[in-house]
Image: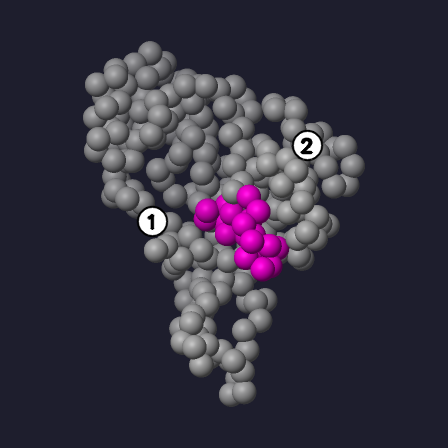
Amino acid sequence: MAFWGGNENSHALRVIKTARDKDSINKAAKNGLKPLIKKVKPSDEIRSKFSVVQNKTTGVIEIIGDYRMGFSSDENGEFETVIKWTHYYPYNFKSPFAAYLIPKDIKVGERVYIEDLIEDYIGASWNQGDTYRLESCEAIWSGTDLEIQYDPSTNRSDFIG
Amino acid sequence: MKFDPTKKEVYTDNDVFIKRMNCPYKMNWNKLERTNSTFRKCSNCDHLIVDTEFLSDNQLLNMVKQNPDTCLKIDLNQHNIKLISNGILGRK
């Protein structure tokens, strides 16, 4: 966890950092930031899929996430499917709560950039039906909360980095 | 090429790690300056961003080895990529 700093977003907005455990939250509070606590609630709309195939001879397994990955599981194939295609929530956060670290001098109506969103919004979709979390988003400070400025049209399929 | 969207890690088809993607500026491909069909330019850090859709595993691996700061663009729907789930499923 790092405290707010830098303008690492394309609109040069103030960056709001997120703390994801008790120690980090308390450290931020002691450093003059106001932690805005939120539950970490996985969304049903975020989902990935997997299947597990197992080598019939060695017992070694492979996890498949793409329908196009060719592991034959027919009678004569080397592998057999031991778990059919199953959907699951593909993220795992260490704490069921987290906090946005709000600077003391934030103004009501100020537009900010949340670097690590706590809430689940769809950020990327794949044509096989899998959906992934939006990592960062702009928000407006209402005086008591951050109003997330999620735009569903930003749901994309490409990644940069 | 293989890609894990949860960890943003890129591998060759033979599971050789290529790169973990991270853009601190959260740039949008459609808003980058077009230089040619394979590259676009980032105005924030002056890097060229490579569209991986038309690269082989070897081309990409060599490019990143020569310059580990190479920025990549991967589209989940591009033809030469398979998605993997190493995220929480592969955790030891």
Q: Does the magenta run of residues contain A72?
A: no
Task: Give left or right: position of A57 versus B41.
Answer: left
Residue at the location (72% across, 37% down)?
Answer: B39
Label 1: which secondary element:
loop
Which amino acid is tagged 2? Answer: Leu
Outermost residue, right side: B36
Residue B9 in percent (x, y) is at: 51, 47
Give the residue drawn at x 39%, y 43%: A120
Residue at mark 2 shares a chain with residue at mark 1: no
Residue B91 bears which disc, if any?
Answer: none
Q: What mark, if any, has residue B48 been given in the picture?
A: 2
Magenta stretch?
A: B1-19
What chain does mark 1 sit on? A
Residue A145 visible to an observer of this rendering: no
Binning the other alpha carbons within 10 Å of mark 2 as few (below 14), some (14 to 19) or many (20 upward) gives many
Name the spot of residue A101 as percent of width and height, x first.
Answer: 31, 24
The correct choice, above or below, for B34 with respect to A109 in the image is below
The numbered disc on residue A92 is: 1
Q: Quadrant of the C terminus of chain A?
A: top right
- Asked which quadrant contains residue A70, the reply is bottom right
Q: Residue at x 64, y 35 (%)?
A: B67
Is residue B17 highlighted in magenta? Answer: yes
